[in-house]
Image (cartoon, rainbow, N blue to C red):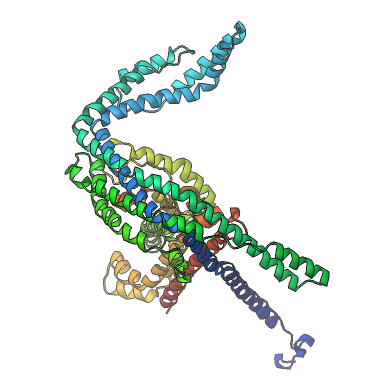
Amino acid sequence: MSKTDEVPHRFSKQGFSLEKAIRFFFASNAGLTIVILVLIIAFLLKEGLGFFPGYRRELEVYRIAGLEFVDLSRSNLTAHEQLSSVLNRAYFAQINGLCASELKRSQEAAAVFNAYSERSAATHDLIVSNLDAGIAPDSEMLATLRQNHAASTRKALAELPATPHLTRAERAALIQSIATREVSSKDDPPLVTALAAQYAAAQQTHAEPLAGLRGTLDAFDAAGTDLSALVSEMTVAVTATKEAIQAGDVLEKNRTTLVAAAAHAKTPAAREKLLADAQTSLAAKTDIDGPMQALMLRKPACIAAHADLRQACAGILDGLPAALSQPEAERLLRVARKAIPAFMANLEQAPQRIGQWRHDTPVPLTAAIGSFLTGKDWVTGGEWQDFYGILPLLVGSLMISLVALCLAIPAGVGAAIYVNQFASRLEQAVIKPVIEFIQAIPSVVLGFIGILVFGSVLRDISQFDSLAWVPGFPIEERLNIFTAGCLLALMSIPTIFTLAEDALNNVPAAYAEASDALGASRIQTSFRVIIPAAFSGILAAVLLGLGRVIGETMVVLLVAGNRIKIPDFSSGIGAFLQPSHTLTGIIAQELGEVPLGSVHYRALFVVGILLFAIVLGINATAHKFVSRSRH
């Protein structure tokens, strides 16, 4: 019997076959994936889009309670305090820079003594407590405690920090004074005291030529006293009004819930009870007009306080020196000189803004959207006012991603080119598994490495005097944008490497053969033929690496520093050595602590929607380049 004459299986007669079953299995999985994606998007939109009406109501309360009016003055007072802080930092940076040697010597001696004290504190405290108990201590027990203390002292003295600015004789004398120090002594070692006195004397010497600047700064600091007192008084009044409005909103929300429940009650008795409870929860209208009239009576005082502050600060630029000799002091002085004109302009405009402000001006929904997208403050759970400005989180995410890509692109793409074009079989067998193994390292482990090893080592290196010319050195915070970016670069290298090598492999062999036939060298073929032909695929690899970086959570949550503030770009490249926060980090940090359904809760979902849109756009663009590289 020929194959064409075979009797079909009885399942085939009924429309069933193995091929159709397999097709149905994979088609159902694909459909399930699409359904899950749609459900995720629907859930994000359902929870997130309710944020903007709720935030609009919060901004409305912020206005009608008078908090916005107080902030018209508070913003200028804050600017005055920040400007005063910058000027004082410049003053002390100048003095400390001139006596840097004395400062470092004093700090190193104190660090040695503190390190010893921390490591021997347990046995030291036991001996002191027994001696101070008021009764004669047991001699045998006391001898044992002293032996333990001597052992801990020897161990502590063997693990003291380095002192590059102390001479060997000074270090030896310091260690000897610590080793022979009486347990009951409460005085610092002689060298620590002497170096502290030398530093204080050097400070006083270098402060004398800056006496005029010190007087100018003291006068500038005192200029905001009246405005500060006025803001404090108004804060108490408007806070009470806000609390009353919020209490009324809560009662109204409860009443609405009870009325809705009454509409679906199963029995007339239950309906009547719910309606009675709703009537009980009916909030009396909050008195806004009375507190607002009292607040508006403060307008003349606010205007006068701003005029006095502007007059007191008018000569601040003339009182500043033309230049300072220390680099950090000069940088801060330039920042202050640049900020002072804007500060004075705001003081000049403040009376008009205060005079024109009205509490009954409507707050449109677009104000809530604009405040979210362009706001520079993410303040939640505060006693004053919650603000949901996403700009510092977005800037932090982009800066960390920029650092990661600047490190990962050369490493990942370069490794892919070498392995694909130049490496021997043995090198390929070693390099590829090692790079791809990085993906198996849990991100939380990399976070621990960043905290305990990389961040600490980098900060220690930045303390060397020979590296003081590097922008941002010495590093104040070991957890910062650069540290997080380095770890994310390590995580994204396998993605970029694997996809870039696949793109190089997809280049037809005929291209290389034609180039070889024309007499081109291996390097010429690689960089003038293969890599240009695979450029779309390499670019797609970079974009997918960016998606991997910007969507990472654990590393940035542990290592980035979690400071919700736009970095100070006046320090140039040093801005990348400052702490920051990210879109993913804020969700992971706050979502488990916020009340379900609150405005804060929904704000985090809007952040998730924005993050989802960013990653989706990056992946869609990468997919476009991948499709182009295959044709």
- Residue 360 or residue 57, whichever sits in front: 360
Please give the name of the residue rendered at 39% of the width and 14% of the height, measured from the top-left corner: 177
| Residue 480 x %, y % | 41, 48
Can you give x and y, in whole percent of width and height, for residue 381 in the image? Answer: 53, 52
Q: Observer-nearest residue: 45 or 75?
A: 75
The answer to whether 279 appears left or right of 121 in the picture is: right
Residue at 55%, 65% (x, y): give it: 54
Residue 34 coordinates in the image, percent (x, y): 60, 75
**For residue 457, above or below residue 605:** above
Q: Nearer the viewer, residue 608 or 420?
A: 608
- Name the residue at 38% across, 58% down: 402
Quadrant, the N terminus? bottom right
Q: Say if residue 541 shows up in the picture.
A: no
**Residue 558 visible at all:** yes
Q: Would you identify the image quadrant in which residue 374 lies?
A: bottom left
Is residue 620 rendered to the left or right of residue 305? right
Whole-percent x, y for residue 122 in the image: 55, 22
**Front residue (pair 393, 243):** 243
| Residue ranking furthest to the bottom | 5
Q: Quadrant of residue 531?
A: bottom left
